Image (spheres, grey):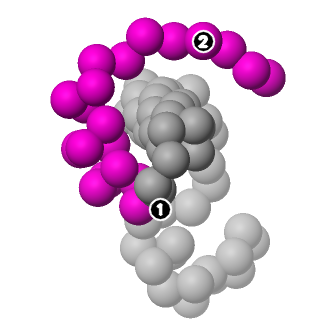
Amino acid sequence: MRITVDVPDDIFDDLFAMTGEKKKSPAISKAVIEFVKRKKVAQFGRLLREGYFDYPLTNDQIESGETVGEQS
């Protein structure tokens, strides 16, 4: 999708350095994608902490590589 946005020029030096891009459109696109990914990860983490998922394994079982139904 093509849009027009006003971004202060002084932001672009940092944006180019952070994204590794040399042109404005790819740099903005990469930054927006990264922002959305980070928000989704944060939301997922919040849901995990609040107990919205009923995961049958303990952390120790996960780290040991056990699968559901398997017991040591």
Residue behind mark 2: 4
Residue type, label 2: Thr
Query: Quick one: SS at disc 1?
Result: loop
Quadrant in the picture for residue 19: bottom left
Image quadrant where one finds the C terminus: bottom right
Residue shown at 41% from the left, 73% from the top: 60
Residue behind mark 1: 58
Residue 53 percent coordinates (x, y): 60, 36
Disc count in the image?
Answer: 2
Residue shown at 33% from the left, 43% from the top: 15
The answer to whether any part of residue 30 appears in the image is no
Query: Quick one: SS at disc 2?
Result: loop
Image quadrant where one finds the N terminus: top right
Which stretch did the figure color magenta?
1-20
Residue type, label 1: Thr
Left or right relative to 37: residue 71? right
- Position above or below: 3 against 55: above
Residue 27 percent coordinates (x, y): 49, 44
